[in-house]
Image (cartoon, rainbow, N blue to C red):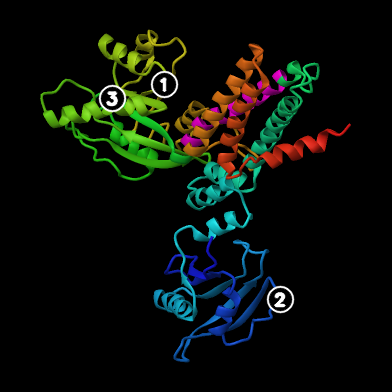
Amino acid sequence: MNNDNICALATPIGGAIGIVRVSGPEAISITNSIFSKDISLAKPNTVHYGEIIDKEGSTIDDVLVSVYRAPHSYTGEDSAEISCHGSAYILNKVVHTLIDAGCRQAEPGEYTKRAYLNGKMDLSQAEAVADLVSATNRASHKMALSQLKGHFSSELSILRDQLLKITSLLELELDFSDHEELEFADRSELMQLAKKIHERITLLAKSFETGNALKKGIPVAIIGKTNVGKSTLLNQLLHEDKAIVSDIHGTTRDVIEDTTEINGITFRFIDTAGIRQTEDKVEQLGIERTFKKIDEATIILWLIDSIPSSDEIENIKERCADKNLIIIINKIDNNNSATDIINQLTTIASDLQHIEISAKLGTNISQLSQLEQALYAAANIPEINENSVIVTSARHYEALTRANESITRVIDAMEADLSGDLISEDLRICLEQLSEITGGQITPNEVLGNIFQHFCIGK
């Protein structure tokens, strides 16, 4: 890592207050050179009022300067934060003045990168910073906060220590391979520990499906025949006129998507083209996209307003076999009873969940309570809190998957009573994959240190 002094805006332009962040070995002295008061000897974690002066000696703005000294700062370096008025002119002028005084413009993510390189956080925590900034709902905020606080890192650290224990014991045997009667590692105990590690890695990897859905929004496809009220329902769910509503069949010819939050979780609603036989090539393309969105969706809202045909039921049954299907019987203002429709649908499932509404009049969805509860239940999301450990990064998931393959080979090797050197190699691979997540590295010295800690070799 270079030791350049960097500066950049830490807040968007246009607010009442803007913050310019400075970091590096000379961050305080550079800030001091453009500040009207002497902060060269200022105590750490103090705030000072004064003016920023440009190189011509003119005042740019009245500001507050916060002083942080290494290692007690975000980056682990000497740092200063200049709080000034949020006009674009003032903020840009302050940045340019800092550059003239010896800073350079920071690269994207460079502050967090320096925090990682200076040991203020591991790699998974650094990635959580970006997730926290981009969090759009309560669930994604809690997941990012949990990862930033190090709960995921702690889980990995426990697994890492357990793997090191196995590796150390096996490598200790290899060091005394000329004494065949010595066996430091109880194979049955190691097998139990390896299976426990395998189980935990599997659970972490499986949580990625939930984490990814919460991060991107749970996809919900609204399907049905043309003119059944899909676009009207979408507008009701989004509380805005997102989709064009018309009595003309085939109005929606492309997929329309938007999101809304229910109980702290983002749902991504997809209004699809009406499914019907048509000669219109453009409408046919829209219907083909509808089928693709059904495949991608986690939850299907099947909107119907009359008894569906046997072919339609079979089509939905085939395409939605592994989906959470919610039947919505629309236009109950025109249809006094939905019993006949439900009886016809028992061929799909005897306990189908259904809701009766009038999307046009807002009956049963004016408060969205019934449908929202059904959607939230269908999502089957576990309770998320700041201590929850849920994988949200594809990179982490891939590393966990590779680690799981390695620990599986370890278990298979121990069951086959293979030699310790073969088992040890797969253990090292598993350790490397887990360390890749946090940015750590397993070294021979660390394994050796673990041996010395638990055993007296000289004895």
Residue 275: x %, y % from top left:
23, 23
Query: Outermost residue, bottom direction?
Result: 57
* Element marked by disc 3: helix
Residue 417: x %, y % from top left:
66, 12
* Element marked by disc 1: loop
Q: Main secondary structure of the magenta part?
A: helix
Q: Quadrant location of residue 315?
A: top left
Query: Is residue 405 positioned above or below 269 on the image?
Result: above
Q: Which residues are magenta?
A: 191-213
Q: Residues within 10 Å of mark 2 (few under 14, many from 20)?
A: few
Residue 456: x %, y % from top left:
86, 34
Q: Quadrant location of residue 28?
A: bottom right
Query: Outermost residue, front direction?
Result: 178
Q: Is residue 197 magenta?
A: yes
Q: Is residue 149 left or right of residue 272?
A: right
Q: Amino acid at mark 3?
A: Phe
**Which residue is located at x 49 percent, y 38 percent?**
395
The residue to which callout 2 is attached is 43
Q: Is residue 330 left or right of residue 261?
A: left
**Which residue is located at x 55 percent, y 79 percent?**
30
Query: Outermost residue, left direction?
Result: 279
Q: Earlier in the sequence, mark 3 or mark 1?
A: 3
Q: CA distance from mark 3 to mark 1?
A: 13 Å
The residue to which callout 3 is attached is 291
The residue to which callout 1 is attached is 323
Of 19 and 431, the residue lying toward us: 431
Q: Earlier in the sequence, mark 3 or mark 2?
A: 2
Q: Earlier in the sequence, mark 1 or mark 2?
A: 2
Do we see residue 153 in this rendering?
yes
Query: Is residue 15 positioned above or below 357 on the image?
Result: below
